[in-house]
Amino acid sequence: MCGRFRLPSAEENSPQAQRVLQAVRSLYSQAPEERKEGQEDCLPGQALPAYTPNGPALVRWGLAMPGRRGNPLINLRAESALEKPFFRRALTRRGRCLFPAAAYQEGSKEGQRLLFRPVAGGLLFLAGVLLPPAEPRGLPRALVLTTEANDSVRPFHHRMPLILPAEQCRPFLFRPERLEALLAQRPALLQPILLP
């Protein structure tokens, strides 16, 4: 499960983080109404920066499914995404995206709030499925793909985002023939940080 993640902050000094921040600023300058200055937490329903096969873009996180009650769908199981015709069509036809993040937040089985960051620092790239806009002039919609928790997340939760290493980002976006293998991989270990 993934219900919140964080954009890199201005304090991140790696070249990769600075490139992401530059893209984020550029995207929000084109749609200033979509972002509050200084807000790093990304929540469902917001317009968020993502890398797509067509370059950086703002996407709306979440999908209202016809006939589904309650909150919009925000996550999709990577293991079964290709079995569902609607999502298979999107994933195999350039409907893929990557959310750049400094960390993601999760609640534990005991109700604790935790932040998961890369052990060695740097950024996370959360794999997602990109869907058409709900309105003619709206933003594309996106869901975060999730997978079984790895050893660092499993003590707290049974699911986690599908996080791709930087070297697999281009194949995920541009090589659909590698999609099945990329959806089945296990993310690297993360550092859990207990939040107050």
Image (spheres, helix red, strand yellow):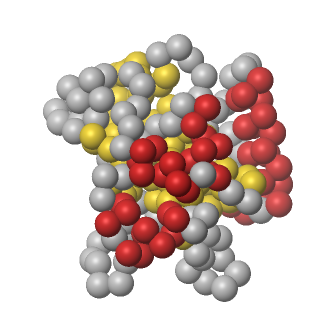
Identity of the residue drawn at 65% across and 70% down? 139
Identity of the residue drawn at 77% across and 29% down? 18
> What percent of the width, then of the height, locates residue 102?
57, 31
> What percent of the width, then of the height, locates residue 173?
62, 51
Between residue 120 and residue 196, name the one nearer to us. Answer: 120
Above or below, 106 against 87 in this view is: above
Between residue 159 and residue 156, name the one nearer to us. Answer: 159
Identity of the residue drawn at 40% across and 32% down? 187
Q: Residue furthest front?
A: 177
> What percent of the width, then of the height, locates residue 193?
38, 20
Task: Determine whether, in the image, residue 192 is placed left or right of residue 12.
Answer: left
Task: Determine whether, in the image, residue 102 is placed left or right of residue 29.
Answer: left
Task: Determine whether, in the image, residue 194 is placed left or right of residue 46.
Answer: left
Q: Quadrant of residue 136?
A: bottom right
Task: Report if residue 71 is visible in the image.
Answer: no
Q: Quadrant of the C terminus?
A: top left
Above or below, 74 against 104 in this view is: below
